Structures are given as structure tokens and as C-alpha cells.
Amino acid sequence: MEANKFVTAFYHETSKLAWERLEPRGRKLDPALLLSRFRFYTGAPIRSLPKAPARPVPLSDLFSGHTLAVFPGPLQDLLSGLLWYSVAISGYRHTPSGETTPLRVVPSAGNLHPVEVYLATAALPGWDAGLYHYRVPDHTLEQRGTGNWVEWLSNLAGKKHRPDLIALLTVVPSRSAWKYGARAFRYCLLDAGHAVEALRLAGLALGLRVEVVGGFSDDAVTQKLKLTDEWPVAFLKFWLPTPCGLTGPPTPPALLPNEPSDAGAGSDLPPLLRQALEATKASHGAPIQQVDQRQSDANGARLSPVELPGPAELRAPFDSVVRKRRSATEFDSQARPVRLDELAALLWAAWAPLTTDFSATEELSRVEIHLFAHSVEQIDPGVYRYCPSARSLIPIRLGPQRSMARQLAFGQSLAGSASVTFVLVANLEAFWQAHGERGYRYAHLLAGIIGHRLYLGAEALGLRASGIGAYLDDDLQRYLELPSTHQPLYLVACGFPISGFEPRD
């Protein structure tokens, strides 16, 4: 079957970075975009949320996919915890000029946060069924609609088992496009992947069963919710562990007459970005056999693989890890080396089980993990590829890599000063073959999901991470000796941060 990939393949090629063809941004900053970093709906009824419940469960339990003990509190407490530990504000950055910038549990390219979150809930004692928008600055929910939105959204995925709660994620590309031009589409999808994993883990920590959904009618959501500058990208279904005590007969979903506070701000998107957005609304069929899959990671290896030991335990409590997560501004290249079992723990977390409607666990092989090992005990500095089936590292090239990593990361020192810089690589041809143009969206969502796991794993080990979306695409691909079907999508640098530097996001 010939893959339907023309638009996103052209977009990916055109949005690559290279020194000789820097994309001229030339886009003036619209002050309204900064004011609209957080959306709210004028005139919407506000539902306050109580203080989020503590969830000091080991992070490793969640990466293992365990749904934890039944959450004992009322629904309001559960909703508060779900948002507080995934997409809420978790601190503030103070600049020398006196400005205060909010920081969130989930990272974002440029701290621009294009992702919006809506919750559809069933009718429960003390809580009306409806559609709610998360109002980030004051940690409240504002009601956008009444009626049975849970069933309506659930039916879009073609599944019969209705959940108790759905989180819908949309992106507002204009928040990122003024800074990053057409490449902002990639960053929006990576940000959405981070948010998907943050919400999934928070749901597990609260005792919910979770399913990630990527296959649905974008146009149906856009029209039903009357979205203008927002694009739906994914949603998560949640089931309560016990009967939820539904109240009252179900009523058809209906919107309330409220409008977004920043409607139309920055709606002038780069044409290439808009074309890619439109193209990924399409999908076809069920997943087919992967193409160009590297069945034997050791075949052709010029150097002996490095076997990884058992991973260090990630027993740090989930609630404190996610709330203190930050992106490092700079790493200490003179710090102690990362232990090999710590590296094994990061890779174990990154490759933890994940099942969605677009990627079963075995399909994660479409996203490979490569790494620049700058300072890791018991292994030589060099570039390696992770082989999850053998739990080993396949050397690609050995020797000091700090300078090269920095150059390939568009001159960003973080990639060279870190102890380890991970490169998440997708077999884009396989995604296109399985899902058409929409596969491009899925590849980036998975890269964002893995990136978020690396962030949290680093925090649990006393390290820190920093995502890097700007790199020299073709130069990096050649340096990693990747086949033409494989493209680097995301870099995540991990190491020991230099104290005294304000975090980036």
C-alpha cells in the first residue's frame, strides 16, 4: 500500500533546520499572544476545585502501568488532583528585570504552552454532567457545556465501553508560531505528548484506568465545540475503579453561550503549518506491518554491545517529583558521572508499557532512542543506540562527543554539557504506512510521551532534564547513521544542573 504522506513529508523536509537555510521568522510578536498564554471563557460558570490530595506513590509503580488503590475522595478532589499533577502551575520564574513568569508541571517549548485541556464528566452526586475547560491561573474549571459530553466524545473512537471522564487536548498553534514559524507544529505536538503522559500518570496515581485515544474525527470535535484557532489532537478516557453513582437521566450535549477570552488572537498561521495541521486530520485503516524495521539490533554492529545492569529504583513519590519538575538552564559538565544503573533506569522508564489506539507496546519500536553518552560510569564516551529487547547499548561511534552534540543541537550548550543527551528517532515511513498523514502526529506525540518520562525519571534520580527541539535535522541524521526512513524528532538532555540558574520552564 502506498502511504498517504505527501503533505507531512513535504512539511517535515521544509521545516528542517540548517545553518545555510535558516527560516526567516520575521514575525512580529503580538502582545495579545503573551496575554493569552492562558485561555478562559467569558461568562462561563466557574467550578472551584479543592486542594489536591497527596499522592506519594512511587513513580516506578506508575511506569509499570499499575492502577493504584481506589481513590477515596469525592469527584472534585479527584479532578483537582488529575489537573494539579499534570498541567497546573507549579511555580514561578523571576527574571532580573522584575518579570514573573509562571512555570507548569508539564514543560513546553519556549514556555509558550499551546495545549488546552477540557474535561467531559458524567453526572455524579454534587457534580453536573458537562464539558469543562481548565482555567490554569486559578486552578478552576469553567463550564463550557451541559449534558452527556462523555458519551458523545467516547463514540467518536468507536468503542462501546463508556468511560466516566474524558480529557480532551487541543493546541493553539499561534502561541508558538510567532516564535518558531512553521516548525511550531512539531513543538505543539511534542508539547501535547508531554501533556498526554502527564495526565495518564496522574490518572493512574489517582486509581483510574486510563486509555489514550488518537483516532477520532477532528472536524466533528471542532464543529461541536465551535473551536476557531484550536485543533484537537488527542484525548484520554478515564474509568473510576468503583461504580460512580451516576445521577439523573442522560441529556444531549449542548454548549453554553460563552466565548474564549482571546478569540482570533494570532490566527494568521504560516501556510505550511496550516497545511500540515489540515493534513493530519486524515487517517486510514488499521495499523499494518511495519516497514524497514530493524529486527536485529546487533546485526552489523562494529563494536561490542554494552549490557545494561538492572535499573536503579525510581521510588521517589510521584506527587513531589511532578510538582518540582523543571527544565535545566545549564548543566555541570564537571559533576560526577551518571551511574550505569541510573542510565538503565531512565531507559526503562522511557520504554515502559504504553497502549493506545495508535501504538501498542510493540509499536514503540517505531520510535528509537539514541544517546550521546558524555559522562556515564563504566562506558566510554560516544554515541549509542538503545536496544530494548536485549537491554543493551549498541555503539555507533566512540570518543568525546560534547562539542559535536552542541553543534548538532544548533549550538545549544545544554546538549554538550549534559551527562547524557537522548535523541528520539522515529521511523516516519512506518507511521505513514500505518496511519497515513495522521501518522506524523502520532510519531511526535509518542516522542513527547517518551520525553516526559525522561524528565520525570531524571527528577526522581536527582538529575534534571531539558528538552531540545532545535537541531540540525539532516546533519544529526547522518551523524547517527540513520536510514532514510528514520528522522530525529526530539532531544532530551539529562544531567546535574548548575545551582543558581533559574529554570527555563
Image (cartoon, rainbow, N blue to C red):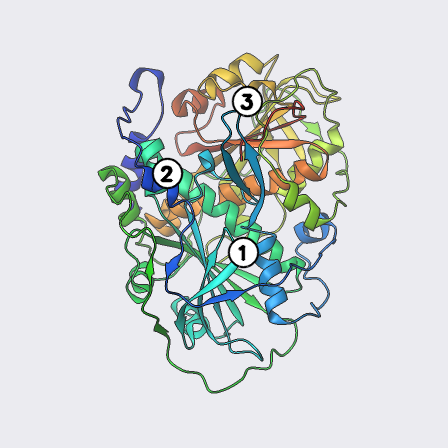
Mark on residue 415? 3
Asked if residue 385 can be seen in this view, the reply is: yes
Residue underneath mark 2: 176
Tag in front: 1 or 3: 1
Residue 20 is left or right of residue 504, and the answer is left
Coordinates of residue 425 in the picture (x, y in percent): 48, 34
Residue underneath mark 1: 139
Mark on residue 324? none
Q: CA distance from mark 1 to mark 2?
A: 23 Å
Nearest the eye: 356 or 147: 147
Nearest the eye: 107 or 499: 499
| Type of amino acid under label 2 | Ser
Do tag 2 and tag 3 residues touch (Cβ < 8 Å)?
no
| Type of amino acid under label 3 | Ala
SS for tag 2? helix
Compared with 252, 172 (above or below) is above
Do tag 1 and tag 3 residues touch (Cβ < 8 Å)?
no
